[in-house]
Amino acid sequence: MGIEIERRFLVLGDGWRAAVTRSRRLHQGYLAREEGVAVRLRVTDGGAVLTIKGPGHLARPEYEYAVPLAEAEEMLGTLCTGRRIFKTRHDVLHGGLVWEVDVFEGPLAGLVIAEVELDDVARVPDLPPWAGREVTADPRYSNAALASAAAPPRG
């Protein structure tokens, strides 16, 4: 079983842009979301992955499986209607870690969230100056919740 340990922060300003090492566009949809479990389908850079995430905020079980691209695109279009996200993900190095800065599109335009994956729940990352309020435990900012949102959360 894989465990994802991740912290999420709202992003302040554009100070992160100068340190981007890689960018890619993501299209993801949610096949199911119930009682803290989410089944996500993600297409990026010509590949597709099905991810099953268990309950939790900071640390949670995570399983990933490759999916044929044509089938993934079909599922996104037919099974994920009303539960999709379009965003560009930028990798930014800071404090010896790769921060993933997601710039959302469509109804979520204007929302920018940074995620950092950790190897231990006790690890406290060096926060970059553009990391704003932490939203790790705020369920409104989970990608599964955002996929169904008509607009970015406020507050």
Image: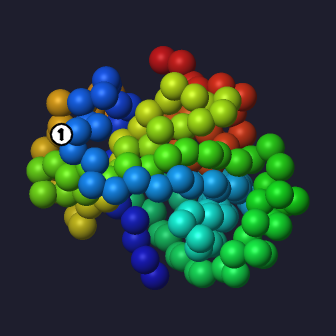
Residue 90 in sight: yes
Residue 72 x %, y % = 73, 70
Residue drawn at x 72%, y 40% is: 148
Indicate the secondary structure of the residue bearing disc 1: loop
| Residue drawn at point x = 59 percent, y = 80 percent | 65
Q: With respect to residue 82, does 151 lie above or below?
A: above
Question: At 40% from the left edge and 71% from the top edge, which residue is drawn?
Answer: 3
Q: Residue furthest right?
A: 78
Observer able to see residue 53: no
Image coordinates for residue 86, horizontal then vertical, percent: 62, 45
Between 64 and 75, the one nearer to me in the picture: 75
Three-letter amino acid code at the position of disc 1: Leu
Q: How is the image coloured?
A: rainbow
Q: Name above or below for residue 73 compared with residue 91.
A: below
The vertical placement of 14 against 91, above or below, is: above
Instruction: Residue 46 in the image: state x and y as whole percent.
Output: 59, 71
Q: Position of residue 1 (x, y in %)?
A: 46, 82
Label 1: few (<14), some or many (≥20) within 10 Å?
few
In the displayed structure, does residue 63 sit left or right of residue 148?
left
Residue shown at 43%/77% (left/top)?
A: 2
Residue named by callout 1: 127
